[in-house]
Image (cartoon, rainbow, N blue to C red):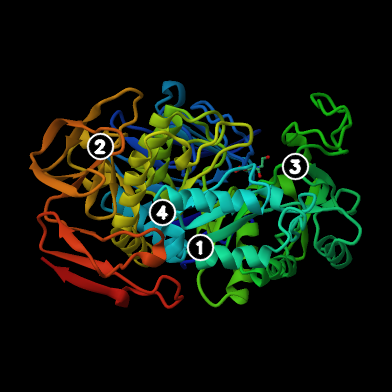
Amino acid sequence: MIRRYTFGEVFETGAVTEQVDEGRALPYFTVRADAAGTRFTCPLGEGDAVYGLGETMRGIDKRGGRYVSFNTDNMRHEDDMPSLYGAHNFCIVAGARTFGAFFDTPARAVFEADYGGSGVLSVVCERAVAVYIVEGECAEDVARQFLRAIGRSYIPPLWAFGFGQSRWGYKNERDIRRVADRYAAAGMPLDYICLDIDYMRGYADFTVDARRFPDMAGLVGEMRARGIRLVPIVDAGIKIEAGDAAYEEGVRRGYFCKNKEGEDFRAAVWPGMTHFPDFFQAEARAWFGGLYKFYTDLGFEGFWNDMNEPAIFYSEYTAGKRGDRSGGDPLYRGGAFLEDYRNFTHRAGGRTVNHWNVHNLYGGLMTRASAEGLDKLLGGRYLLFSRASYIGAHRYGGIWTGDNSSSWLMLRRNVTMMPGLNMCGFLFSGADTGGFVGNASRELLLRWLAFSVFTPLLRNHSCKLTRRQECYRFRGKRDFRSLLALRYRLLPYIYSEFMKAALSADLYIRPLAFGYPADARARKIEDELLVGDSLLVAPVLEKGARGRTVYLPAPMTQVRWTGERFETSPLSAGEHFVEVPLGQAVFFIREGKLLPVGRGGMCTAEVDLAAVELLGDGTEYAQYIDDGVTRDVSLQNVRILRR
Ligand code: MIG
């Protein structure tokens, strides 16, 4: 059961799509207005866990931390970093009493969960907020009700579940061909290669640098024939440049955000000075989405939207102010200066609203604009993922978790973020495998792959000037081949479980606490996850480890992927030390469940979802299966496989 309680004059975010009744008095929380905003306080019992909050640092249980919803471009992903790129204001308190709470506000919100041992969950909303309280039988039930209320997840095409290679620094068609050739030569599967900002002319969206990519349509077609898609990046800011069609049309039609004087707001990002599209205006969204025709005409079917917090490097409004280090240089790359978010406005529903008060919606509305455009431009499904997001944007695209780094902590955070993202609707998500900033070691990349082969979005991405991180760059290619092959062998399961979760408002990845709520030990586990209905995954997260200790809440079938075959053996409930050599993967099939594994392939087009072998001790498996592109998706596409 869900009830809505409003505090102040709420800006409707569109996050909740289901009809929800207004409640009378807000349960669980005491409410007080103070200088910071409206403060909601709920006492936490000793044993209560706090789940959710999507893209945030720290563990699966958010207790002990402080999290600030204010979408931020920040690559220092340490556990004390309060804000990342998304604002996912849904959490679940689970313990003596279990309920969910969604603080639906586009403005800044601060969550403190037993922060400093306060013994309370406190949420401060700077502006008006609609609070949704979700009551259910258990944490999982609460999460599922919430997923139903916020509407169906974005559904990518099958190829988007393949492996993608990316790097900031691929600068011309030779670089792209080399990636494709070397993956093929190494016998490693690949489904897409991302084009980062260097494909553009002067970093302007909806352009291609013709010196670097003289025949982009030809390249897209050539790659497509090899089973590889190209996926360009699209940044939020539109370059201010006479003659640029997007710029001129945007100005003429009044589709850009305004400064306080009512002029088009100017801020510098990669292209130099830009204007930000006002995604709050329906017409501006339709216009922006239509601009993707430039890309679809070239044959592109996948996109990643970046810089849409929006990130700002410099602005003339704050230049010279205290704390500004730009020295008035418009090409200064210093990172967002918070004050700038107060310096521009949107037109929404006939009113002018200051950006500051609706900041967290901006990136999600860009995703929506892109998706609605692509829905019209393309006949089938497309890949779309964004950096910034708000709950509701999960209906239009996926997200990646931004500029992490090549460290063991980041691998662990990839694991702990996934369940929270799923609770907030972002089923199609994943991290930069291997890490974005810094230099990945061979060992780290292999251990990371052994985990991220289970995440829907599987992409190796890295930053300019870091060590080359493509799998073929490392010695002992066999180990990389093994893990990538595993992903393609698992695709019938991964795709099926993702689709069933999306179509039935369920989670694709869950904490053990959800699957085994009566098991006190399972409730505390932060380094094992349930993936789909059949699997328990326990990745190796430590440098130099030969394997790891795994806790199984129930007897299971252990599966060892050797690189060539799946070796299964029954394992009792309890603790086991499991050896996992690099390049192998070990995971577990739950009691009474089955895992369909396929024959794999060098790209998703070669994968036959129907040709599966069943592992595990269950008796039947409900497999979702379709052609991978149709928009006609429903649970009718499920067939029952019997052992
Ligand atoms: O200011 O396009 O998170 O994935 O490679 C950096 C360059 C801009 C940030 C993205 C990252 C991407 C990079 N972008």
Residue 610 occupies quadrant:
bottom left
Q: Secondary structure at mark 3?
A: helix
Q: Which residue corresponds to mark 2? A: 523
Point out residue 72 in the picture as x, y percentages from the top left corner: 63, 39
Answer with left or right where residue 127 lies relative to residue 349: left
Q: Are marks 2 and 4 in contact (CB under 8 Å)?
A: no
Q: Secondary structure at mark 4?
A: loop
- For ligand 1, tell me if the residue under mark 1 lies within 8 Å: no
Q: Secondary structure at mark 1?
A: helix
Indicate which label's residue lies in the foreground, 3 or 1. Answer: 1
Q: How would you rate the neighbour count of disc 4 (Cα within 10 Å): few for under 14, some for 14-19, many for 20 or more?
A: many
* Label whose residue precedes the other's in the sequence (3 or 2): 3
Above or below: residue 367 compared with residue 327: below
Q: Which residue corresponds to mark 1? A: 395
Q: Which residue corresponds to mark 4? A: 189
Q: Are marks 3 and 2 in contact (CB under 8 Å)?
A: no
- The residue positioned 72% from the left and 44% from the top of the image is 356
* Label whose residue precedes the other's in the sequence (4 or 1): 4
* Label whose residue precedes the other's in the sequence (2 or 4): 4
Q: Nearer the viewer, residue 252 or 384?
A: 384
Q: Nearer the viewer, residue 506 or 534?
A: 534
